[in-house]
């Protein structure tokens, strides 16, 4: 095989580039070099001869009977030595000696070839990864650049920006990593593949890979919420009544969910059943806390959730994490209240409505069930709404609202005094004892 042909085939094989792209790069390089040697105004064409393995250069000249411009014309007698059938006025290609190119022109040709090969490589990588957006890929951490991780994916390098990293995770060069492809951008330096370890989509994809029922579409992830590296919640549903969606995701002895937890380096994951009933769904989302009662405000898309006193801290979670994830998961605003707090509130509401003869705790309970869960709510309650209750007229409704506003101020004052006393007691308990 001719050396140049062998080199072309080898580059095409090693780089995975179409042979025509390399041949085109060679022809373009030789054309640029020829124009640099003979002049840019010359009409020159470069062709790769597959038989000889050379890039041949042809300068096109006009065939004439008598030369008036020796740079662009050729006598018909000489032209017929190249092509016996040529006629005056025809264009004919005269082969130029390509062996005359010096070291500088060869360097120009080399640079053009390198550039075209790189462009072709970038195009191949972009075409390969543009369709992998939304997939989980495996790679090896290579280096750090301004807080970002550069990850080797094999044929390409990807970047894991600082904002897409998990604070509790640390990597060193050479570590293996799995990440979610959130975007692939085509840039001058080559395709930029953006990865994420913090996205909710990574959580979903990991479950899809571990749970066959999700991959097959029998079980669906209806919603997910995540605080990367700490805790996540997913809500799942089943299209088959015989398949328990939560059980499918947990797996035998927790094997499936533990595989995801291990990949996310110990991130806690709650799997809850999705429900079309908002109250049932919110109760599930707040698990493992037990819920006593739910008061729904459809218009405001909010819920007051009442829990036993011993479940309050569990429902709220550390630094409010459990209820915060439940809000993200369900899309409802959730206000957690203890049973004792609601009993206390019922007493305040009963005081407010007692300005109406015969009214007391039963009416307060009705208001609570209608979503009036504070004195401020009652003070702002429309008169028309209160008048819908039995045994109250417009005057009575206005009296209730006025009394509720007064009691709200009193309640705030008492709460402030209680808070001050608790702060003082805590300060006193924390100070060292004075020696006598």
Image: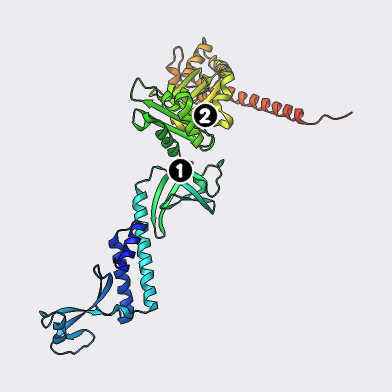
254 is higher (above) or lower (below) than 194:
above
For the point 41% across and 25% down, the residue is 248
Can you give x and y, in whole percent of width and height, for residue 227 in the image? 51, 36
The C terminus sits in image quarter: top right
For the point 44% across and 18% down, the residue is 387
Name the colouring of the figure.
rainbow
Question: Does residue 332 appear anywhere in the picture?
Answer: no
Label placed on residue 323: 2
Q: Secondary structure at mark 1?
A: strand
Alpha carbon distance from label 2 to label 1: 28 Å
Q: Earlier in the sequence, mark 2 or mark 1?
A: 1
The N terminus sits in image quarter: bottom left
Q: Quadrant of residue 418?
A: top right
Q: Is residue 100 left or right of residue 404?
A: left
Q: Which residue is mark 1?
A: 179
Can you give x and y, in whole percent of width and height, for residue 247 in the image? 43, 23
Q: Is residue 348 left or right of residue 16?
A: right
Depth-wise, is mark 2 or mark 1 nearer the camera?
A: 1
User: Residue 2 or 378: which is nearer the viewer?
Assistant: 2
Total numbered circles: 2
User: Residue 313 or 164: which is nearer the viewer?
Assistant: 164
Q: Secondary structure at mark 2?
A: helix
Question: Does residue 154 appear anywhere in the picture?
Answer: yes
Q: Is residue 251 left or right of residue 54?
A: right
Can you give x and y, in whole percent of width and height, for residue 351 in the image? 57, 16
Whether pointer 2 and pointer 1 mark residues with C-beta atoms closer than 8 Å, the reply is no
């Amino acid at each position: 095989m001719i050396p140049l042909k062998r080199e072309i085939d080898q580059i095409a094989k090693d780089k995975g580039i179409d042979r025509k792209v390399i041949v085109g790069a060679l022809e373009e390089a030789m054309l640029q070099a020829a124009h640099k040697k003979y002049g840019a105004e010359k009409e020159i064409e470069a062709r790769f001869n597959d038989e000889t393995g050379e890039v041949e250069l042809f300068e096109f000249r006009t065939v004439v009977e008598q030369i008036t411009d020796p740079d662009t014309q050729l006598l018909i007698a000489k032209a017929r030595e190249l092509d016996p059938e040529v006629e005056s006025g025809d264009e004919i290609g005269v082969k130029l000696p390509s062996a005359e190119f010096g070291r500088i022109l060869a360097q120009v040709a080399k640079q053009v070839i390198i550039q075209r090969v790189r462009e072709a490589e970038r195009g191949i990588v972009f075409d390969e990864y543009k369709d992998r957006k939304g997939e989980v890929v495996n790679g090896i951490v290579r280096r750090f650049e301004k807080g970002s991780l550069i990850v080797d994916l094999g044929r390409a390098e990807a970047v894991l920006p600082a904002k897409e990293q998990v604070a509790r995770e640390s990597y060193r060069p050479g570590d293996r990593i799995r990440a979610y492809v959130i975007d692939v951008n085509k840039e001058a330096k080559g395709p930029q593949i953006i990865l994420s370890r913090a996205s909710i989509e990574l959580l979903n994809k990991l479950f899809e890979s571990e749970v066959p029922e999700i991959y097959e579409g029998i079980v669906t992830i209806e919603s997910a919420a995540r605080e990367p590296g700490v805790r996540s919640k997913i809500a799942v549903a089943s299209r088959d009544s015989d398949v328990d969606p939560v059980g499918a995701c947990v797996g035998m002895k927790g094997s499936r969910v533990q595989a995801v937890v291990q990949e996310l380096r110990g991130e806690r994951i709650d799997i809850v059943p999705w429900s079309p009933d908002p109250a049932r769904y919110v109760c599930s989302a707040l698990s493992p806390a037990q819920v006593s009662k739910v008061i729904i405000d459809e218009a405001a898309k909010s819920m007051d959730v009442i829990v036993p006193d011993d479940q309050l801290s569990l429902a709220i979670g550390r630094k409010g994490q459990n209820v915060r994830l439940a809000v993200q998961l369900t899309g409802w605003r959730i206000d957690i209240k203890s049973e004792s707090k609601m009993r206390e509130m019922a007493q305040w509401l009963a005081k407010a409505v007692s300005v109406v003869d015969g009214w007391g705790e039963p009416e307060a309970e009705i208001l609570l069930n209608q979503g009036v869960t504070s004195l401020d709510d009652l003070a702002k309650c429309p008169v028309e709404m209160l008048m819908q209750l039995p045994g109250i007229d417009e005057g009575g409704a206005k009296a209730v609202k006025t009394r509720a506003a007064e009691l709200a101020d009193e309640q705030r004052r008492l709460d402030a005094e209680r808070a001050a006393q608790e702060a003082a007691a805590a300060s006193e308990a924390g100070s060292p004892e004075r020696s006598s």
